[in-house]
Amino acid sequence: MDILLTNDDGIDAVGIRALYDALESVGDVTVMAPKVDQSAVGRQLSQNVELTEHELGYAVQGTPTDCVVAALGAMDFDPDIVVSGCNRGANLGEYVLGRSGTVSAAVEAAFFGVPAIAASVYFPAGDITFQEFTPQPEHFSEATRAVRYLIEHAFGAGVFDDADYLNVNAPLPPEEGHADMEITHPSHVYEMDAENERGTVTIRDRIWEMMAEGSVPDPQGSDRRAVVEGRVSVSPLTAPHTTTRHEALDGLAEAYDG
């Protein structure tokens, strides 16, 4: 198994090292990851990027999407799967998919026709802010365990016959045993808002506050509900921008006076 590993937290992040260590026994792991943190850049693409050698592989002065395109387009890598993560923070909900650099790397791989897994860990808010929290390798153990399991079994089970990529979100490890796994769909719940105070607009994602309280309005079967309740969420997804026939729009096109 040839594995291309990337992320959006940067090549020196704890999460990508934890995933690298977990996957070394599964296959030949090559890392091509951003040189510095590129969180929440979505599918942003650069025109030119600099590559430097790193003990894990290559550091890229660019985005996660740059890493995938560079690896598959310029470096002649031919991986069986692309893995992105483990992200420091969950990537949950339909509205987050296009925003996340972690997920965007998996989407880019899908357009190349390579199966992919995006992996993230939910860190509940506590007495300190998310930015102040320093994760340790053990915090990623449920995510790395799930990714390894999926890589070992998903191909044989035909998972990637229908799914282009899997969005995996894991909770922190429980005190005893391991978290269960649930196949989910991205939540449709959207709780973004903004406040304008003297010309400064503060943008807030209220979902994080709800998750900290354990009171998310997401239904059973959704990714966010699974993670808040302590399960590993696996959402099988396809590359975006699919189209369907739309009779109302067909009618407008027919009536258009060109």
Image: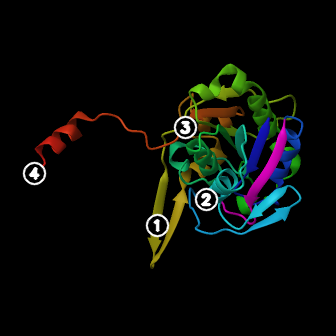
Mark 4 residue type? Asp
User: Where does residue 139 sit, x and y in percent of width and height?
Assistant: 83, 46
Q: Residue at x 67, y 68 (%)?
A: 49
Disc 3 residue type (three-letter)? Pro
Give how far apart the Cα atoms at labels 4 and 1 are: 43 Å
Q: Is residue 30 magenta?
A: yes
Side (left or right) of 201 relative to 102: left
| Neighbours of disc 2 within 10 Å: few (<14), some (14-19), many (20+) | many
Point out the frontmost of discs 3 and 4.
4
Q: Are marks 2 and 4 in contact (CB under 8 Å)?
A: no
Instruction: Provide the residue span drawn in magenta.
Output: 27-39
User: In the rendering, at what x and y percent does residue 232 appear?
Assistant: 71, 33
Residue in the image at 59% along x and 50% along y = 104
**Residue drawn 14% across the image and 41% down it:** 254
Disc assigned to residue 195? 1
- Which residue, given by chain and number where applicable, does mark 3 sit on? 186
Towards the viewer: 148 or 81: 81
Q: Residue at x 49, y 50 (%)?
A: 191
Marks 1 and 3, how far apart in space?
A: 27 Å
